Image (cartoon, rainbow, N blue to C red):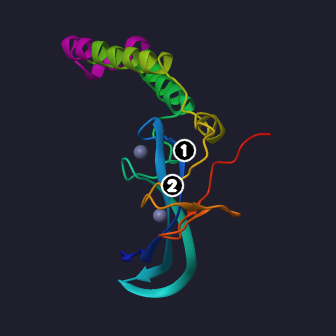
Amino acid sequence: MIFFQGFYHFLPKTTAFRRDYCRSCQEVRTLTQIRTADFYHLYWIPVLPLGLWKRWKCAGCGNKPYRHTKTSRAAKAFLALVLAVITFEFWFEPDLADEFSSQELLICRIGISALLAFALVWLKRHSPELTREQGHALVPHLAIPNCLLCGGPMQRGTPDHCQICNRKHLPVPREQ
Ligand SMILES: [Zn+2]
Ligand SMILES: [Zn+2]
């Protein structure tokens, strides 16, 4: 039986902004913090209120800036290992000669070996994704005199907020 279920994000409201590194854009962007009232729904009927949730969104690409976008080194290594085992079987398992013609076997051996080669190159060229802290470190230390969302003057405070749209500036945490 299939349940139609999921989450609703009602009443989205932009409450804050910051400059930070977006993993999708691979650049420092303006991020907006969106607050929503979330509900769990079953057959499109909101049955369980989950309260207010805040999420960061990149103003450049619209994606979640802190979401992982790259395949991890471990996943690539695992894929290469699996392909290595299969490649080994195709080359050295004697029973396969009974199941396939020699031509079929040759095509399979070349194909799987090529896949293994691609997987190994992919693993070798792996460049790790920036951690959140590394991304924060790319953001210049600049005072923000005007709101990045509406251009209005900022009011000093904890935190600073825009005098026009009232959205807060929540700068990235800095290592002391
Ligand atoms: Zn982005
Ligand atoms: Zn503003």
Spatial separation of the CA atoms under disc 2 and disc 1:
17 Å
* Frontmost residue, 137 versus 153: 153
- Determine crowd level at label 1: few under 14, some 14-19, many 20+ residues with C-alpha closer than 10 A: many
Of the 4 image quadrants, the one containing the C terminus is top right
Quick one: SS at disc 2? Answer: loop
- Residue 77 point in image, percent of width and height: 53, 25
Q: Is residue 109 left or right of residue 26?
A: left
- Residue 49 point in image, percent of width and height: 53, 85
Q: Amino acid at mark 2?
A: Asn
Quick one: SS at disc 1? Answer: strand
* Residue beneath the point at 36% across and 75% down: 2
Residue 20, label in figure: 1
* Frontmost residue, 145 versus 127: 145
* Frontmost residue, 34 versus 129: 34
- Residue 128 point in image, percent of width and height: 55, 28
Q: Which of the 4 image quadrants contains residue 43?
A: bottom left
164 in relation to 45, above or below = above
Query: Farthest residue toward the right?
Result: 176
43 in relation to 174, above or below = below
User: Which residues, given as a range, are shown in magenta?
Assistant: 89-107
* Residue beneath the point at 55% across and 52% down: 145
**Is residue 89 among the parts visible in the rendering?**
no
Q: Amino acid at mark 1?
A: Asp
- Determine crowd level at label 2: few under 14, some 14-19, many 20+ residues with C-alpha closer than 10 A: some
The mark that comes first in sequence, 2 or 1, is: 1
Residue bearing the label numbered 2: 146
**Is residue 156 among the parts visible in the rendering?**
yes
Residue 140, label in figure: none
Magenta stretch holds residue 170: no
Mainly helix, strand or loop, the magenta region?
helix
